[in-house]
Amino acid sequence: MDKRRILILGGTAEARDLAGVLADRTDLAVTLSLAGRTLDPAPQPVPVRTGGFGGVEGLSAHLRDEAIDLLIDATHPFARQISANARAASAATGIPLLRLERLGWDMVEGDRWTRVANMTEAVGALGKVPRRVFLAIGRQEAKAFDAAPQHHYLVRSVDPVDPPLAAPDVDYLLARGPFTVAAEVELLRGHRIDVVVSKNSGGDATYGKIVAARSLGLPVVLVDRAEAQGGHHAGTVQDAVRLADHLVGSSRKRGV
């Protein structure tokens, strides 16, 4: 059988779940691409390639060389550069692109959110008065908070923050989700946290901190996502499977 070849740009639980759903399909050959930023990635259900592509030109060349029929961008909602590269490579090659991006969180009664557009605004939203801040934003953008060294920071990430913050009062916590609400409440209480800083990543795995902050009456500085670009979008794995079937069928008809 002439299998249709799918490349998934991954690194999220949704990418792994989608790969798992597609893994047993005899009509598809699925590869999952990981950037390699996480030192100990979780096991994956399909063949994996690791490392970058070398920008738009490198990704475009890979799509052509591997005769990819469908590119699925299932990277983190805040992985802006790789998503931009995927859109450009799709346009350059004519290979259809599907964006799988889990839905963001919505404010509910009891939430005390300050919504900001980026980390610079998040730093400013903390104010000048020293506070005890839980940075639940991963490691790559934590250095932005060196601009406000008056605060105490608790930084949680899967891998170490390297280089560490220059701010004088910082604790580091290495942990991988999912995190329960009870554990998050204990963490916030134990570290006497005044305010939580989080990206609006969506999903269940890290929502516990949002619920915990709500239950403790703590404010959350929430960094919003960039506005979605045009193209094919899915908010769930199930929707992505349906769209993928449509798009690989369309690419076959076009001779892509």
Image (tube, rainbow, N blue to C red):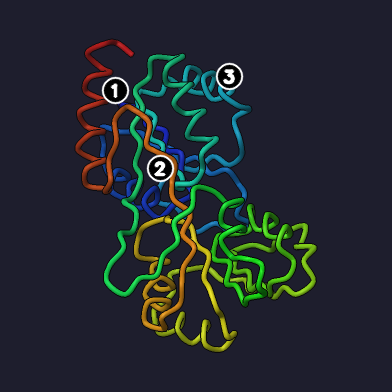
Which type of secondary structure does the marked residue at label 2 adopt?
A: loop
Mark 1 residue element: loop
Farthest residue to the front: give it.
Answer: 128
Going 46% across and 48% down the picture, which residue do you hit? Answer: 76
Q: Residue at x 33, y 14 (%)?
A: 256
Q: Whole-percent x and y of residue 2?
A: 29, 22
Q: Nearer the viewer, residue 92 or 172?
A: 172
Kind of residue sitting beneath label 1:
Asp
Total labels: the figure holds 3
Residue type at the position of mark 3:
Glu
In the visual, does 141 lie left or right of 105?
Answer: right
Q: Mark 2–mark 3 contact, CB under 8 Å?
A: no
Look at mark 2 in the image and give the residue it sits on.
74
Q: Is residue 158 above or below residue 76?
A: below
Q: Earlier in the sequence, mark 3 or mark 1?
A: 1
Q: Residue under label 1, please give it.
A: 2
Q: Quadrant of residue 250?
A: top left
For mark 3, does the 10 Å Cα neighbourhood hold few (<14), some (14 to 19), or many (20 or more) residues? some
Establish if 254 lies above or below 55.
above
The residue where tag 3 is placed is 57
Residue type at numbered disc 2: Ala
Q: Is residue 152 above or below residue 47?
A: below
